[in-house]
Image (cartoon, rainbow, N blue to C red):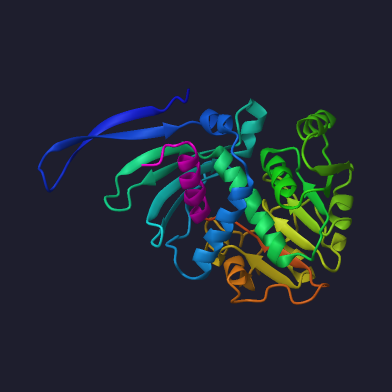
Amino acid sequence: MRRVERFPRFVQTKTANARIALMVRFVTAEEIAGAALPVRPIYDLVVEGFTLCGRGEAECPPKAGIHTRPGAFTHAMPAYLPTKDIAGSKIISVYPGNDAIGVPSTNGIIVMSDAETGIPSTVLDASWITSMRTAMVSMVDVAHLANPQPTFGIVGATGVTGRAHIEAIAAIYPGSRILVGSREPERLKALFADTASTDVTLVTTHSNEEIVRDPDVVIVCTSHLPEPILSPEWLHPGHNVLNVHSRGWPCDVLSAVDLVSCDDRRPITDPVSGLLGCYPDLDPDVELGQVVVGAHVGRETAEQVVFSFNYGLAVFDILVADHVLRSLGQHP
């Protein structure tokens, strides 16, 4: 039986001048994991989110962030979808140093609010939602900016984000070949055991150069890195590079690519919490939502090298959170 924590509070209504008890529900990570929700619908929700953004039918301001430790951050991410009347905010923290002390590096919550009153209705753990919507954003990117029938390589495949991408590839591109590697053999062994029933073929290498050079699509899921570990010399014509965690490349890598894509240019070019510190010349050519709705062609030739910075939009979080609540039978 699902455990739903409820936190009662009271509000004074304007109409009845009465105190009405409100129950704020909390949906735990265990509840979401226990539901074993299929991931294919998350892809469709992400496409819907990009479509709404591409049509200008979403209110999704740039993230506000704080940075209490080097390489770490906490972001506040609100969004509102007028056509669906869904509103909410995500608060997400990424602290790579947590791994060393046995604590998850990514932690967060999503607060869903009543669009009419602004009153919070539900708090959801953000872990699974963040991982899967991130991976499905990559799949939408591949569908619109990569060449057909791609092979894949994942740098950082053994982490939470890398594993989510393997699950997403299996759902959207079943039977795919994925090149993976790790400096820690035990983590790689665990990855193979955990994905044994997944409809992909994992191929091991101990070389980041091979993970980049060999496949058509390279997904970079590394955490914060003090120094770049990837080289622009490894890129080849036709590459689609998805920088989920983007600091693995030197700043001059942009001179080796033909097209730079992003989900939203505002957050990645923000001077405080964006990527200009890593890539001073970063100026995206296109937003992926424009490609999804047909306002921009995206890739123009099979030989182009496409570099994507999908930094994360709250639109996807609240769409997936709404879907989770409906799937659990907890939607108002």
- The answer to which quarter of the image holds residue 293 is bottom right
User: Relative to 32, is 133 above or below?
Assistant: below
Whole-percent x, y for residue 3 in the image: 44, 24
User: Relative to 305, is 73 above or below?
Assistant: above
Horizontal arrangement in the rendering, residue 239 relative to residue 285 (left or right) = right
Q: Is residue 167 magenta?
A: no
Q: Is residue 321 magenta?
A: yes
Whole-percent x, y for residue 136 in the image: 64, 52
Marks counted in the figure total 0
Horizontal arrangement in the rendering, residue 216 relative to residue 101 (left or right) = right
Whole-percent x, y for residue 44 in the image: 59, 55
Q: Residue at x 79, y 66 (%)?
A: 147
Q: Residue furthest left?
A: 17
Residues rendered magenta in the picture: 314-332
- The answer to which quarter of the image holds residue 85 is bottom left
Residue 160 visible (yes or no): yes
Whole-percent x, y for residue 291 in the image: 62, 71
Q: Residue at x 53, y 41 (%)?
A: 93
Which part of the image, by quadrant, shows the C terminus?
Answer: top left
Residue 94 visible (yes or no): no
Horizontal arrangement in the rendering, residue 132 relative to residue 324 (left or right) = right
Nearer to the camera, 155 or 124: 124
Q: Residue at x 62, y 53 (%)?
A: 43
